């Protein structure tokens, strides 16, 4: 009886060399799959976040622009006569003043960020410009993002202005947002 208990206590259970090798191979395959499939997903998630922040920045500027009058020479409430409008003698309406010349698009003399009052005042806005009613710049709130706003006339009759907002993400992707503002 003593011999039996001695044999059972001396048998040590463990892994064989083949089991260890197979385990390491399975673990290696799992690590390769993780590094090739899962880890790049983190980079794509960051790109998505940058695109969302880019859209947030452009949308905030567009909302602000949409609240402004079309041109310096247009009635602040819109309406009659819009700049560049022809006289309508049949309705008793005078001709509108000329719209701002393409070479003069941008802030008017003496205008600062908080006093922009028409669409083309935003021409030249960048990440170093102050945010509305703030001493903060866009760069301080959108770190490593670049911003460029351009306002142009897309056609010769000056009845619309093309607002182009280029936002460059920290990864260097340039995302362009365009909107047309009509003269009414």
Image (cartoon, rainbow, N blue to C red):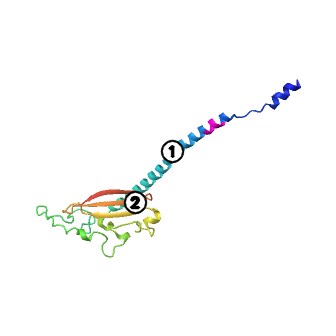
Q: Between residue 76 and residue 56, name the one nearer to us.
A: 56
Residue pictured at 72% horizontal, 34% vertical: 14
Is 27 on the left-hand or right-hand side of 182? right
Of the 4 image quadrants, the one containing the N terminus is top right
Q: Residue furthest bottom?
A: 110
**Residue at x-position 33% and y-position 62%:** 65
The outermost residue toward the top is: 1
Range covered by the magenta-colored residues: 20-24
What residue lies at 88% left-to-right and 26% top-to-bottom?
2
Across and down, in percent, residue 112 comes to 36, 72
Would residue 15 appear left or right of 6 to someone viewing this image?
left
- Our reading of the magenta stretch's main secondary structure is helix
Q: Quadrant of the C terminus?
A: bottom left
Q: Nearer the viewer, residue 151 or 182?
A: 151
Under circle 1, the secondary element is: helix
Alpha-carbon neighbours of circle 2 within 10 Å: few (<14), some, or many (≥20)? some
> Vertically, is 114 above or below 35?
below
Looking at the image, which is closer to me, 18 or 173?
A: 18
Q: CA distance from mark 2 to mark 1?
A: 28 Å
Q: Quadrant of residue 117?
A: bottom left
> Given this view, does label 2 or label 1 mark the residue nearer the observer?
1
Total tally of numbered discs in the picture: 2
Q: Is residue 83 magenta?
A: no
Q: Which residue is mark 2?
A: 168
Label 2 vs 1, first from the N-terminus: 1
Find residue 42 and report its horizontal and vertical position in percent.
50, 49
Note whether residue 66 is visible.
Answer: no
Binning the other alpha carbons within 10 Å of mark 1 as few (below 14), some (14 to 19) or many (20 upward) gives few
Secondary structure under badge 2?
Answer: strand
Q: Quadrant of residue 68?
A: bottom left
- Which residue is identified by label 1? 36
């Amino acid at each position: 009886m003593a011999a039996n208990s001695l044999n059972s206590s001396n048998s040590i259970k463990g892994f064989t060399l083949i089991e260890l090798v197979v385990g390491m191979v399975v673990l290696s395959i799992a690590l390769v799959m993780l590094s090739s499939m899962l880890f790049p997903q983190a980079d794509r998630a960051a790109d998505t976040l940058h695109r969302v922040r880019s859209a947030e920045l452009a949308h905030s500027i567009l909302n602000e622009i949409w609240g402004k009058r079309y041109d310096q020479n247009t009635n602040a409430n819109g309406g009659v006569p819009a700049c560049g409008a022809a006289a309508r003698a049949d309705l008793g309406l005078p001709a509108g003043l000329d719209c701002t010349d393409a070479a003069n698009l941008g802030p008017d003399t003496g205008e600062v960020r908080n006093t922009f009052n028409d669409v083309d005042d935003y021409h030249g806005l960048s990440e170093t410009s102050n945010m509305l009613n703030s001493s903060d710049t866009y760069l301080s709130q959108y770190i490593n993002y670049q911003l460029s706003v351009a306002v142009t006339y897309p056609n010769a009759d000056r009845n619309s202005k093309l607002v182009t907002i280029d936002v460059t993400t920290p990864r260097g992707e340039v995302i362009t947002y365009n909107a047309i503002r009509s003269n009414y």
